[in-house]
Image: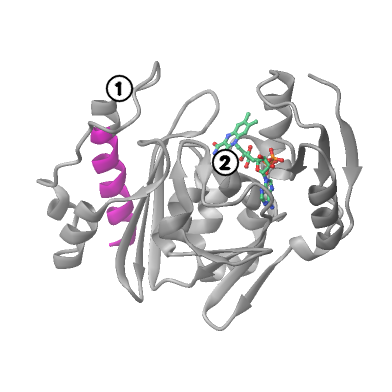
């Protein structure tokens, strides 16, 4: 790890001031991805700005048909929240599948979404539920947020404040976990929303994406058999030591069927 300066901010304004005055700063949530990346010398920020003292970034509330989750809310807090369990149980379920207890107590929803790891769980729910990403500058629609591998629509100096999830009629998440890390080899999140059926896929491609093919089939007939003949193209999917692109394409349908079964 290269040398860096550590700062603990106590307000968003303080974070913004530091970002604009320091040489090459990076904000830190729970450090679950950032610290290992720095240890491997894949990142070498001049300064780390720790968000963990900023209370306005924490907590879960309900407002006019939305569940709003602060960026610094941990996976454990989402998993155990009575409000999330009642209004969007699939989201609480998803949070409980992430990593191990340490990761769930340190890792945050804002850090996970900002990171856009191709195998992270939350991005599939953000896309499927049609969540809005609220930053210090604007509101970003989920369909425009995930751009590529570890790349989002966020500017370098932009801070996620919260995520705003519309409460769906019903939704379900199923994932095939990588046995060592528990990251999703493939995860499929299906929601019946006010806009219709939305399907978010993670683990399969460079970043989370919507499956318009599955959405179309399920909009006509919400059964497992409706997606039997849907073709999931494997050309642009990930292929690595854990799974080939073709296997991931196969898993998309298997996980989608399990999610449909859960909802039926
Ligand atoms: C062993 C292990 C297993 C894991 N398993 C899973 C799994 O099964 N499923 C899964 O989904 N994830 C998994 N993770 C990832 C984990 O869930 C964390 O969410 C993820 O690592 C982000 O961590 P963090 O919240 O601590 O963010 P950090 O590591 O602190 O930050 C990550 C990145 O996001 C940026 N960032 C953080 N907060 C904000 C913000 N508010 N606004 C803008 N940018 C921000 C940082 O600058 C940094 O670039 C695993 C991690 C580990 C170490």
| Magenta part, dominant SS | helix
Q: In terms of image quadrants, where is residue 106?
A: top right
Q: Nearer the viewer, residue 85 or 240?
A: 240
Question: Which residue is drawn at the image coordinates 28% and 27% (left, top)?
Answer: 245
Residue on which disc 1 sits: 244
Which quadrant of the figure shows ligand 1?
A: top right
Task: Tell me where the magenta segment starts and ends, as one range.
Answer: 249-264
Q: Does the residue labelled 2 lie within 8 Å of ligand 1?
A: yes
Q: Quadrant of the N terminus?
A: top right
Alpha-carbon distance for marks 1 and 2?
A: 23 Å
Q: Which of 126 and 155 is in front in this view?
A: 155
Percent position of residue 218, x then y: 20, 61
Visible residue check, residue 197 = yes
Q: Quadrant of the C terminus?
A: bottom left
Q: In terms of image quadrants, where is residue 159?
A: bottom right
Between disc 1 and disc 2, the foreground one is 1
Q: Classify mark 2: residues with Cα within 10 Å, few (<14), some (14-19) or many (20+).
A: many
Residue that protrudes farthest toward the left in the picture: 229
Percent position of residue 102, x then y: 72, 36
Q: Residue 98 carries which label?
A: 2
Question: Which residue is drawn at the image coordinates 13% and 55% (left, top)?
Answer: 226
Q: In terms of image quadrants, where is residue 184?
A: top left
Percent position of residue 181, x then y: 55, 27
Q: Would you place residue 13 above or below residue 252 in this image?
A: below
């Amino acid at each position: 790890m290269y040398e860096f300066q550590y700062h603990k901010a106590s307000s968003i304004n303080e974070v913004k001031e530091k970002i604009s005055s320091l040489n090459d700063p990076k904000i830190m949530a729970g450090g679950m991805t950032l610290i290992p990346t720095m240890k491997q010398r894949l990142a070498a920020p001049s300064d780390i700005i720790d968000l963990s003292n900023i209370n306005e970034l924490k907590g879960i509330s309900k407002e006019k048909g939305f569940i709003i989750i602060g960026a610094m809310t941990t996976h454990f807090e989402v998993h155990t929240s009575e409000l999330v369990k009642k209004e969007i149980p699939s989201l609480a379920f998803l949070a409980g599948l992430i990593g191990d207890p340490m990761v769930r107590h340190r890792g945050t929803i804002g850090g996970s979404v900002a990171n856009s790891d191709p195998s992270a769980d939350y991005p599939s729910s953000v896309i499927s539920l049609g969540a809005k990403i609220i930053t210090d500058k604007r509101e970003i629609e989920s369909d425009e947020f995930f751009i590529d591998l570890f790349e989002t629509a966020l500017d370098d100096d932009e801070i996620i404040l919260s995520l705003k999830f519309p409460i769906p009629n019903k939704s379900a998440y199923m994932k095939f976990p990588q046995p060592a890390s528990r990251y999703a080899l493939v995860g499929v999140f299906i929601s019946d929303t006010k806009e219709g059926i939305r399907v978010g896929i993670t683990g399969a491609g460079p970043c989370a994406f919507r499956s318009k093919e599955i959405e179309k089939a399920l909009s006509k007939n919400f059964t497992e058999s409706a997606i039997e003949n849907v073709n999931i193209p494997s050309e642009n999917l990930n292929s690595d030591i854990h799974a080939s692109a073709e296997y991931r394409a196969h898993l998309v349908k298997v996980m989608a069927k399990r999610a449909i079964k859960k909802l039926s």
